[in-house]
Structures are given as C-alpha cells and as structure tokens.
Amino acid sequence: MIKLEGLTKVFPGHNIPAVKELNLEIKEGDVCVLVGPSGCGKTTTMKMINRLYEPTGGKIYIRGEDALQMDPIKLRLDIGYVIQEIGLFPHMTIEENVATVPNEKQWPKDKTREKVKEVMTLVGLDPDVFKDRYPTALSGGQRQRVGVARAMVSDPPIMLMDEPFGAVDPITRARLQNEFLRIQERMGKTIVFVTHDIDEAIKMSDTIAVMREGELIQHDTPSDLLSAPADEFVSNLVGRNRSIKRLHLIRINEILEDVSRGKPLNEDAKKDDIEKQLAESDIRSVIVVDRDNKLKGVIGVNDLKRKAGEVARDYCQDVSDTITDDATLNDALSVMLEIGEGYVAVVNEDDRYQGTITLGDLLNVVKEDS
Amino acid sequence: MDQLLWAVFDTLRAAGNGMMLSAQSDDPGLFMQTVNWISRRSEMLMELMLEHLWLVVLTLIIAVIISVTVGIIISYYESMAQTVLGICQILMVIPSMAMLAFMVPLFGIGFTTGVMALVLYSLLPIVRNTYTGIRELDPAIVEAAKGMGMTERRILFKIKIPLARPVIMAGVRTAAVMMIGIAAIAAYVGAGGLGELIFSGISRGHQPMIIAGAIGVSIIAIVFDYLLYYGEKRFAVEGRTREGN
C-alpha cells in the first residue's frame, strides 16, 4: 500500500539529514506506528508521505503509484490527516470543520451532510448536539474526536496521524485509543501513526517501526519487537519490564472465557445464595446484576454482616469503576490500581456485565507468555 | 444624521440661553456665539461635513484595497516584510504639512492631492495589522488545512483572512480616525472639508468658525469609530483565541 524507498530529507541549512535512506513497506489495512525519541525523524517521514515536506531523495509509492509525480493537492485529499494540536478551524462550526474535505472535493450538499452525521456518530459525538457548536465549546477529548472525524469523513484509504492522542489526559487517551481501534477494526484503513510513547505504539500497532537519528532501526510486529529487539537501543526503548508491556497486546475479551467465575448474582437473590457464592468466590465478593444483566453493584463479605436486608439488592454497593471488554489487560491493571481492588468488573459496550478479571489472572497471563 | 445634529443644536441653544440668563449680560459669550453661528450656517456646515466624510470614505476604500493586498503579499514573503513595513513607517512619520507640500507638484491643488496624501498616511496601520494578523495565526490551523488538501488560495480566503479579520479591522479603525483628523489639514491644498472652516476661521480671527469646524471633525471621528467598532463586533469570529488543550 505504502512503500518508501531510500527516502531522504535534508533540511536547508542542516548538514545531517533528518531522515536517511529510509526503506519501509506498509501493508494495506495495517497500522504502522513510527516510534522513537523526539528528533528521530518520525514526523518528518510522515509529512513526506503527504508531501508537506518534499523529500530530498528517494521514492514514495502509494498503491504502486509514484506519489512524487502526483498533484500534491489530489494526493492530500485522499489521505486523512490528524495532528496533535488538532488544528480545528475556530471560526467554523463542528459540522463545517468536519465537512472540510468534502467541500474541497465539491461533493453535493446533502451527501456531505449525510456523511458528516455518519462520521460524527462513528467517533461518538451526537451530531444533533455538536454539529452547530464551535470548537472552543468542546473539551480536549471531544476536539480530538472532531479531528479524527474530519480526517475520516471522505473515507480516505490512508490516514496519517501525528500523536493524535497526545494532548489529552491519560484516561481520556486510553478511551480514545480503544474507540479508535474499534473503528479501525471495522474500517480497515492503512494508517501511519507517529508517537514517542512505546506503550501506545505497542497497543495501537500491527507493526512498529523504531527510528533513531533519521534511520529505521527495526520494523516488526509488536510481539516480535518485544521478544527480539534488534539492538540495545530498541531494548532500552521497550524497557526492562517487557512482560508487563505484553499486557498492552492482549485484550480482555481474549482471556475472559478462560477465567470465567460462573454466573453473577441476580439482584433478587436470597441471603443464603449470597453466602454460598461468597464462600466460593476467590475475590471475597460477588457481583450483582439486574434482570437485563446490567451491573448493579458488588457485595463483599463484610457487607453481609454490616447491613440488614432480605435480598442481594439491599446489600450491594456501587462499584467505583468498570472496564469495557475491548480494553487491554494493561488498562484493566490501571483500573484495579486506581480503585484499590484486586479485581475489576468487565462490561460490554451496552453496559452489560461480561465477567470479572483479577490480578491473579493478569499474573497467569504474564507467566504463560514469557 | 441630520435630525441628530438638529437635536444637538437645540439642546446646546437651550443650555446657552439658560446660562445667559443667569449671567444677566448682553454679551452672548463665545459659547453662544458658536451656537448661533452654527444654527445660522447649519446648511454650509452640513455640506462641509459631507465633503469631509466623502474624502475620508473614498480614501479609506482605496487604502484598504491597497494595504490589505500588500499586507497579504508580505505575509508570504518574509524577506520583503520588514522593508515594506519600514517604508510605510517612514511615510507615516512625515509631518502632514510636509506630505501635502510634496504632493502638490505631483497632483496640483485639489481633492486628488488630499486623497493621495491621506492614502499614504493610512498604509501603515492597515498593512501592519494585516501582516501580523495573518502571521500570528496558530500554525497548526494552517498546517491542518494544508495537510487535508486545501489549496493555498482556499486557505487564504477560507481560513487566513476570516481569522485575521478582527486584527485587520482594528487597523482600519486606527487609520480611519487618524485620517479624519489629517483630512482637516488637507483643506490647505484645496481638498475641501471641515478644514476650510478651521483655516478661514484662523485667518479671519473668527473663533466660532474654528470651534464649529473642530466640533464637526470630532463628531465625525466619534461616529465613525463607533460604526466601525460595531461593524467589527457584528462580524466577530467566535472563539478566535488559540485553541487550548
């Protein structure tokens, strides 16, 4: 899909090339993450693909076509572009912002409107609520979503993303990452993703290209990169605690079946049942759900003694946080540490209870893997 | 405008009468003299005000067209910018009398000369504000526009100019108010306007005439500034500030 051959960029007035003889091939539908310390040439490489920077030497092929021979405007219109600062146009509404590329391509008005609605919904922004707002009325996370929507609206086969989730807080970032992966699973775009965060790289990528001082050091799948780093630089980059980093690679729904803890309690369950289940539980608590299998709360051993009541509903306490089943094991670990429990309840997109993950489960996974 | 002026005159006259009664004197005083003069010569005053206004409006239109164009051009050619801004700066610090004198050999005496001199004066504020307004846009906005495939032309008209407009308009306002003042001096080269009243008042030692001219200039300046300010607000761009995180 994208092939870089001997790509070189020397900025005027510099002796050392920012990117040196780079060869890289990205398959269709893959997310390739360029990672490395700042100044390693990853952003420069990305900006050469849509020719914001003209290469000094080398070739860029997109679907076998020589990108350097194409009209740069046409080339860019078919490549989605997201940057860390987002760069929303403050004098335009969200709808107008998202419609930028369709307007440049002169789509018919109703087609544009349809598509804007569709893509806003896709990134989790209700079009009826947000389309007439201005960017300043949005939170950082919402703006990032608009940025992604704007890049995706004309359905470009390729997307370039320069630290797209860099400017938001860690919790929002994890959520945006998960949502983005969910969208990507459906859309199957070819994505070049730039980040300096190796954890993000491992989580988001099909392949990782590690760069240093303008050179490509290693291009591999994340698990190969973790198990066989090419040199000391790469192994330093991925860090010593590689087994913990593996937690980024595994999603909760992949292990949920193996760690099944039986059925949760119904909110109408009698005290005897609660006691029975509590005795069997390895987390000294039981999860309570309502008739629709929605999470109701949790009952700990102490709750049963402390409170009075007839059925499970009376004893149960709210859970402080849950996690969705498409999150990674690392996300699960963070939530556990945050709520200070050895377990976390897993729900799906519709908030239905799916199971429970414990610290022990994570430990087993890491042990098996290494 | 006409009605407004009459209302102002009436109020002034009423106030003047009151003052005269309390002073119990037959000498009308400078204030009353002026009010009387204005009410007697209101038609001529109106005419001169309109002439003055026309001089300013015409100059402003020409100046905006030239200056905004120049401002946009130098925003693309950084190396030219300092030279051009320097020239505009020099033009502005030339005393107005001297500037008018320079113009006379070129354009003779009359309206055209006045317009030319005024245009040269108003270049700096508009050129500088256009240039800074565009240069100081958040570079991420321009980069995003470019990266998505907008042409340079579209970026200029859809992104840069709308976003820089408040800054450009502030420059236009500065130029306009400045010009209204200098336009009075342009009467020296026969450009007409309220300056005629002031100058003939000075040469004849007729104070009410001078004051009437000065009041006229002030009213035009205040009204003009207010109108431009109001217009700017109406077209104001929402959330123009740099995007925070």
Image: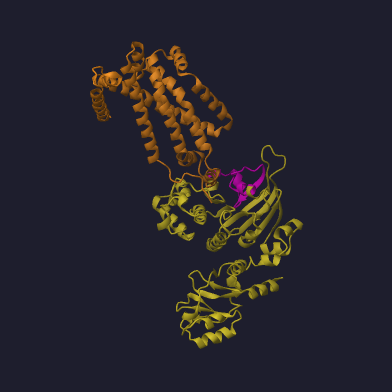
Res. A71 in view: no
Residue B46 found in image quarter = top left
Q: Is residue B178 above or below residue B190?
A: below
Give x and y (percent) for residue A123.
49, 59
Left or right position of A250 against B103 = right
Residue B242 in magenta stretch: no
User: Which chain: orange?
Assistant: B
Task: Depth check: give the residue in front, B214 or A111.
Answer: B214
Count of marks, rendered view: 0
Give the extent of the magenta segment: A44-73
* Residue at point 52%, 56% (across, down): A141
Residue B91 drawn above or below residue B235: above
Identified at 58% across, 52% down, the residue is: A160
Residue B84, percent from left and from top: 54, 26
Is residue A50 highlighted in magenta?
A: yes
Q: Which of the image's four quarters has the C terminus of chain A?
A: bottom right
**Along the line of sight, which residue is nearer the eye, B184 or B215?**
B215
Task: Answer whether residue A228 is visible to the viewer in this image.
Answer: yes
**Chain A drawing hue:** yellow
Quarter of the picture containing the N terminus of chain A is bottom right
Residue A45: image location, x then y, percent: 64, 48
